[in-house]
Amino acid sequence: MNNNLEWLDDLNAQQRQAVVHGEGPLLVVAGAGSGKTKTLAYRVAYLISRGVPPERILLMTFTRRAAEEMIKRAAAASDRGAHMTSRVWGGTFHSMANRILRMYNQQAGLPSDFTVMDEADAGDLMNVVRHELNLGKNDKRFPRKGTCLGIYSRCVNGCEMMEPVLTRHYPWCLEYKEALKTLFTNYVIRKQQRGVLDYDDLLLYWLQLLNNEAMAREIGGRFDHVLVDEYQDTNTVQAGILRGLRRFNTNITVVGDDAQSIYSFRAANVRNILDFPQQFTGATVITLEQNYRSVEPILETTNRLISQSRERFTKDLWSARREGQRPKIVTCKDEAAQDRFVVERILEHYEEGIPLHKQAVLFRAGHLSDSLEIELTRRNISYHKYGGLRFLEAAHVKDLISFLRVVENPSDEIAWFRVLQMIDGIGPATAGKIIAHVAKAHDPRALKTFKPPAAAKEGWADLGQLMDDLVTAEEGNPAAQVQRIRSFYDDRMALRYENAQARRRDLEHIEQVAARYKSRRQLLTDLTLDPPNSTSDIAANPLKDEDWLVLSTIHSAKGCEWDVVYVIHASDGCLPSDMATDNDREIEEELRLAYVAMTRARNFLYVTWPLRYYQKWGSYTDKHVYSQMSRFLSDEVRASCEMVSCGTSGYADEMDQRGGYDIVEQVRRQISSQWD
Ligand code: ATP
Ligand code: MG
């Protein structure tokens, strides 16, 4: 044991108290940038330095990247090397669940080769079941697969009955309650028959395991300490898992900020953090008050912003970083002016010495950066985009992964559907029969004993050969398996999709990634549970001197910080999103999103909004609609900022010039986005 604890000196008194906290539950609750994540990382380092074996520490974060980052910080902070800290169990709740379920699959009643479906596949399976049951046939209003999955997921993650969930979130689906019950019951049975789990199942099975006292003793007994970051965004099932894990040992540390709770649409429950002291009796509660991230003028603005929230637990913060530029709220003539403004500032700051990767552009929804991306490309500024459509959601990537999945779990029907679609001459009905046939044998080579339709003969033999090769391939070399799949798939892909060249590069990337893995299962697990956000995320050998700008949805920016932050499209309808202005609760969450976005900034903050949007439809006309500045930029918030206009002759002039058409449009928009 090493007793030299000088490295704790770069913490303040409260942080230090949390880091050296002894036994029993601990809650650290504090606003953005107050060092919660840093405290947690130091606590990991501290525990290890006190002799806790790293493999007996469980650290749960919102993304794998965050866990890796914290473990690196822990290694850097203490004098214990990375070889120690890397043994910590770190990752998301879902990936930890997967790891546990692989170890205890028998006790959980799961086959050893179960596979995990992503959301899109879960939606497809829901649809298959729905069609088989003939539910909502010829009824165009029957909820779509995404909605069905949303309802299902809310019920299971929130541990709620269907009726209140429907009443509150999906009132238009109430009339389908009985049909949905049948659908969900069958969906669950189907997953169990096929040995596939959706994301929610990972958590549910883990929770069920822990409900058994002996298992709770066994699994909880693996860990001396459990630590959780971003606790405000956990749901009821996750809170239950933590209680289960800590039935016989109460060492648990959670940190979070209720003002940053932004995942209630995924059934996250901010009550988890507020009720922690009741759920874990004897909990110590520590609050942090100093913000180390942002300069004082930015903090002043973000404090004013969040003060509009009706219900808040965490207190305002203060900053010792007194000097700094006030945030700028920039009214732009239109989207093009907004793009120009942002790009010019990026280049200016770059010239001043702030590299691109220390600057980030944030937006409410993935598509809101479309036009900026064009401008960045035109100006040769490289960028990485986080959030929005993920790499793994691209059709060709899903195709390739489906091949691996059917070999891993020959009963995985959604993966089989994708694979079989690649063979000409096989329709959905035949595909269904083939899948049943293969699932019965639980061996992909059983394709050989199925008589294909005559039209499918050619591709059929190739597919059979491919399955043979994959099943007999060397287990420890998944890259070779990906290569073999590509030799089958490349030409077929080029026939099916446009842009074959770019897609081929993606597949090459997967092959390179696969080379880092020793088993197909581990590769699949990581690709499904911690998917890379963009192609560049998984580039094998990133150039050392490469620099890129960060584009991110606000949701994906959680926990991060940059020297310069641009929050774009801060107009009503985008932030708050007009998809989320039905009631106070939704608007409150949008306000917290705005807070998360603006609190990412260290030194410079720009909040921009275009005064008018050109309508995308009726492209030969020049119609545009006027927007409103985000309602969250209240008088108080604006008073703490510098107001700037860009490309306009001034807001007032623009208002005067509005034509009759726009006024009508304006009134419509305003009424539809009233507070109440
Ligand atoms: P968020 O709520 O956004 O997740 P957080 O509370 O987790 O924020 P951190 O990300 O841990 O905050 O810290 C914010 C910044 O402040 C980081 O750059 C961190 O290194 C720095 N910081 C935290 N505590 C201290 C300290 N005691 N001294 C100096 N810098 C600190
Ligand atoms: Mg944090």
Image: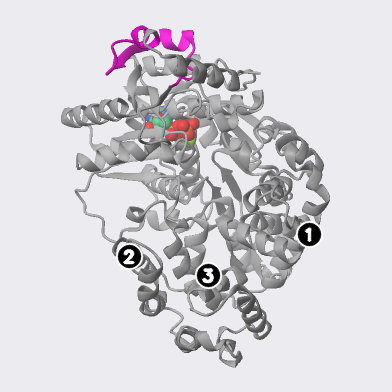
First to last magenta residue range: 626-655
Q: Is mark 1 within 8 Å of ligand 2?
A: no
Name the residue at the right extreme: 178
Q: Point out residue 430 in the picture as x, y percentages from the top left corner.
A: 62, 79
Earlier-in-chain disc, 3 versus 1: 1
Q: Is residue 422 visible?
A: yes
Residue 312 x %, y %:
62, 21
Answer with the quarter of the image where residue 3 lies. Answer: top left
Tell me which amino acid carries mark 3: Arg
Q: Nearer the viewer, mark 2 or mark 1?
A: 2
Position of 574 with respect to 613 (left or right) is right
Could you tell me which secondary element the residue under label 3 belongs to? helix
The residues tagged by marks 2 and 1 sit, at their Cα atoms, a distance apart of 41 Å
Q: Residue at x 30, y 64 (%)?
A: 505
Q: Callout 1: few (<14), some (14-19), or many (20+) C-alpha neighbours within 10 Å?
A: few
Rendered-image quadrant of the C terminus:
top right
Badge 1 element: helix
Give the color scheme: rainbow, by chain, secondary structure or one colour. one colour
What residue would you read off at disc 1?
A: 185
Q: Eyeballing the image, is 338 above or below 508?
A: above
List the residue tagged with mark 2. 500
Q: Earlier in the sequence, mark 2 or mark 1?
A: 1
The three-letter code of the residue at mark 2 reads Ala
